[in-house]
Amino acid sequence: MGLTLEMSSGIVQGETIAAIATAIVPQQGSVGIVRLSGAEARAIAQVLFHAPGQQLWASHRILYGYVRDPQTQQTVDEALLLLMWSPRSYTREDVVEFHCHGGIMAVQRVLQLCLAQGARLAEPGEFTLRAFLNGRLDLTQAESVADLVSAQSPQAAQTALAGVQGKLTGPIRELRSACLDILAEVEARIDFEDDLPPLDEAAVTKQLAQVWQSVTAILATAHQGELLRSGLKVAIVGRPNVGKSSLLNAWSRSDRAIVTDLPGTTRDVVESQLVVGGIPIRVLDTAGIREASDRVEKMGIERSRSAAQSADLVIFTIDAQQGWTVADEELYHLIHHRPLILVINKTDLLEAKSSLSIPEVAWPPVYTAAALNRGIEDLENTILQAVQGDRLQASDIEITINQRQAAALTRTCAALEQVQTTIMNQLPLDFWTIDLRTAVQALGEVTGEEITESMLDEIFSRFCIGK
Ligand SMILES: Nc1nc2c(ncn2[C@@H]2O[C@H](COP(=O)(O)OP(=O)(O)OP(=O)(O)O)[C@@H](O)[C@H]2O)c(=O)[nH]1
Ligand SMILES: [Mg+2]
């Protein structure tokens, strides 16, 4: 991605870029937006957009009119034009948005006209990259923008929004400046040893411990952040007819999967999207696993096995009335190395729970009667316990960090621990500064104050085009 930006009248304006900013769905969607940003955005819009009457081309105005092909004078769309002049825009450059009719035709034709006028097709995330380079957003905010777009649950969206609003940046900047203060104190002692009172080692140690504690507290949100961002893949696995599809249906409150009293009903993996405790969950209902001669059923069973192997969590379902059978035991041996929750279904047909002998697994078994919608809440609680343990709950945390930020903060912690050891071992002050600088550098990578072009490329290539 080119980072070539030009300075003009104090504002950094890059090459003019263009992209369709809305989701592109053929023949659907009421509005589609083409976005332009850069030094030529205004000029290009003025060539393409005909605004009848005395409409003013002023910032933060919306014009009504027609997009026309300047070559043929043909009208391409009837549209609204939103103007945001530098620096009061997302990128801080001149930004123009064509609000066209939905579907793909209008936006694609308008985009082509913009490109024909000299704009370049934007790279993924390039608008947000410019917002970052022009100081409109720091790196944590920019990354949160991508998280907000891809959020799959209200909680994921909420923590992403907190990130966009800078709620992660503030604390990280404070910690970095605390480290810089300590570094300055130490360096002053190295440079002007005779003129200054000796360093208060106890005070420095205390400050370092405080910074370490705050960094560790932020690091603790990484696991939850990952769950909120990526969600979980959960596979319901078991013998035929134990009620796996009934469980999916009860859980998703739908008739998503076909349920019959015939073993071997489900032939292929059926998927449902759910949200449990803020965590987006993809639930896979699979074909009952048994020795089958039917070719289609065999293929389905193969898919069940691979779903069980690739899932983050397996819900191993058995029939309460039949108890723990030899076939259950065989199947259990195939997958017991996976994180697994035991579900004992059809408990409505059972007189007493205690008569069942089942293997010990990490989490308590869940008793359900899927056909009667019973036990779903227990199942959800056990899943949350399995994935969160004693860790922070989604509702307890305001911000979360991603893997990149976690890696930088882990380096920060290691560097701070190293400084402590250096102090304890009474090593010379030069040694202190090495690790303090590492901590400052790592914290700067989180906010983007210290970042290389290749790191930026990697971060922004994960964005969608038009954002
Ligand atoms: N009494 C009772 N019957 C249930 C319960 N859950 C499912 N069933 C019945 O058990 C039968 C099998 O249910 P399914 O959900 O199709 O079972 P499955 O595990 O998906 O079966 P396959 O797709 O063949 O592997 C159906 O007749 C359901 O109505 C339950 O909790 N109690
Ligand atoms: Mg089924």
Image: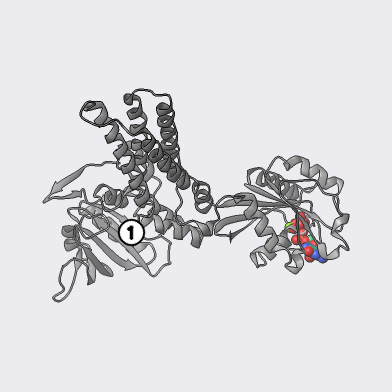
Above or below, 449 against 157 in this view is above
Q: Is residue 193 left or right of residue 298?
A: left
Residue plotted at (63% across, 47% down): 311
Looking at the image, which is closer to me, 336 or 163?
163
Q: Quadrant of the N terminus?
A: top left
Q: Is residue 294 left or right of residue 187?
A: right
Looking at the image, which is closer to me, 402 or 49?
402
Q: Residues within 10 Å of mark 1 (few under 14, many from 20)?
A: some
Horizontal and vertical percent position of residue 397: 49, 56
Horizontal and vertical percent position of residue 14: 21, 48
- Indicate how the structure is coloured in the image: one colour
Horizontal and vertical percent position of residue 400: 46, 51
Note whether residue 265 is visible.
no
Looking at the image, which is closer to me, 254 or 410?
410
In this view, which residue lies farthest toward the bottom? 53
Total residue callouts: 1
Residue plotted at (63% across, 44% down): 310
The quarter of the displayed image where residue 354 is located:
bottom right
Which quadrant of the frame does ligand 2 lie within? bottom right
- Residue labelled 1 has its Cβ within 8 Å of some atom of ligand 2: no
Which residue is disc 1 drawn over? 108
Q: Quadrant of the C terminus?
A: bottom left
Amino acid identity at mark 1: Gln
Residue plotted at (44% across, 33% down): 417
Horizontal and vertical percent position of residue 313: 65, 48
The quarter of the displayed image where residue 72 is located:
bottom left
Above or below, 168 against 25 in this view is above
Q: Is residue 67 left or right of residue 261?
A: left
